[in-house]
Image (cartoon, helix red, strand yellow):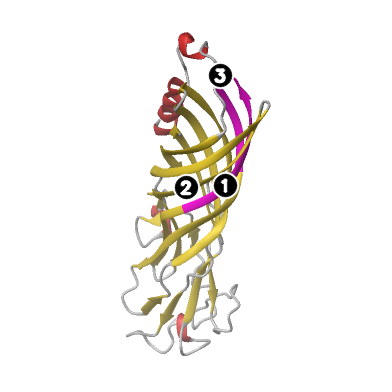
């Protein structure tokens, strides 16, 4: 419903009165500043899992086994945060939410073709989790949240009088905040912290001049950030020497998400003031 409402709002926003459409077309050449307000959501990642490095050699993909040789994580994984230590209780979905940005750029018009460069900075409220379930039973949830983010994008489009249709793409950065929660109270867990994630942002949109200096529009952006540096070490803590996490290496076992990309979609309403 939130996405549908935003798309409907964007459609209303770019619906310009006939009098405005009839005004003389103004050149798109020049600098501009503006803002974006939208809704960010994530693609489904139900196949994501947590990978393990039991011998601490830096290579993930090991199986954590009990003293009897059984797979300690046979209950499996889910693409979300746990509701309960038992896998049968399922997981909560990832959190989507409001996304806002400020931007500034410069366009140049050649005939009906418009090319330019735009930089943007903003905040997001999306959060992405994955959970592993052990046979004890216990749950282990790794969560990453995107907050501050920025991009520098090229854009190129077709000017139809006071209407601009465009595609865009460029490099992106985001501050990813990582966290770890578990119902296991006997082992000791240490995470490596937050990370700067780099990637790309692509999309397209429509922009409509309302006055020679003011425009509104609707925009879609897809962002993919490489976020693969965070890991969690499970040490012995108060558990027995036969604990599965210390059977192969007494120093413990490392956890890492199988999904190395933090992907998101944003649909937004835009406003720009041109000088």
Taking 237 as reference, is 85 above or below it?
above
- Mark 3 or mark 2: whose residue is earlier in sequence: 3
Q: Nearer the viewer, mark 1 or mark 3?
A: 3
139 left or right, relative to 117: left
Mark 3 and mark 2 residues within 8 Å of each other at the beta carbon: no
Mark 1 and mark 2 residues within 8 Å of each other at the beta carbon: yes
* Mark 3 lies on residue: 25
Few, some or many residues within 10 Å of mark 3 (<14, 14–19, 20+): some
Q: CA distance from mark 3 to mark 2?
A: 27 Å
Q: CA distance from mark 1 to mark 2?
A: 8 Å
Q: Residue 75 location, x and y as percent?
A: 48, 63
- Mark 1 or mark 3: whose residue is earlier in sequence: 3
State whether the magenta stretch is mostly helix, strand or loop: strand
Q: Which of the pair 152/236 is nearer the observer?
A: 152
Q: Residue 231 location, x and y as percent?
A: 47, 72
Give SS at disc 2: strand
Q: CA distance from mark 1 to mark 3?
A: 25 Å
261 left or right, relative to 16: right
Q: Residue 222 location, x and y as percent?
A: 55, 44
> Residue drawn 40% across and 27% down?
5
Q: Which of the pair 59/23 is nearer the observer?
A: 23
* Mark 2 lies on residue: 120
Please provide the residue range marked out in magenta.
Answer: 150-168
> Residue drawn 36% across and 68% down?
182
Give SS at disc 1: strand
Q: Nearer the viewer, mark 3 or mark 2?
A: 3
> Residue drawn 54% across and 22% down?
26
The question of residue 140 being in magenta is answered with: no
* Mark 1 lies on residue: 153
């Amino acid at each position: 419903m939130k996405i549908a409402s935003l798309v409907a709002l964007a459609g209303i926003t770019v619906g310009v009165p006939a009098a405005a459409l009839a005004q003389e077309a103004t050149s798109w050449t020049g600098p501009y500043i503006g803002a974006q307000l939208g809704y960010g959501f994530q693609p489904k990642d139900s196949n994501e899992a947590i990978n393990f490095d039991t011998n601490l050699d830096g290579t993930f993909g090991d199986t954590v086994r009990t003293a009897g040789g059984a797979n300690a994580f046979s209950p499996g994984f889910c693409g979300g945060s746990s509701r309960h230590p038992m896998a049968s209780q399922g997981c909560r979905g990832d959190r989507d939410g409001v996304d806002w940005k400020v931007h500034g750029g410069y366009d140049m018009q050649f005939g009906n073709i418009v090319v330019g460069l735009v930089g943007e900075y903003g905040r997001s409220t999306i959060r992405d989790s994955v959970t592993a379930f052990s046979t004890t039973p216990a749950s282990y949830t790794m969560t990453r949240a995107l907050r501050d983010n920025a991009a520098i994008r090229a854009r190129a489009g077709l000017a139809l009088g006071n209407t601009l249709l465009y595609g865009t793409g460029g490099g992106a950065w985001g501050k990813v905040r990582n966290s770890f929660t578990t119902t296991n109270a006997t082992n000791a867990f240490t995470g490596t912290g937050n990370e700067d994630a780099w990637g790309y942002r692509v999309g397209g949109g429509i922009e409509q001049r309302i006055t020679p200096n003011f425009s509104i529009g609707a925009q879609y952006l897809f962002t993919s950030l490489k976020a693969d540096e965070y890991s969690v070490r499970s040490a012995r803590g108060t558990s027995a020497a036969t604990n599965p996490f210390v059977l192969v290496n007494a120093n413990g076992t490392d956890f890492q998400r199988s999904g190395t990309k933090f992907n998101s979609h944003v649909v937004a309403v835009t406003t720009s003031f041109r000088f």
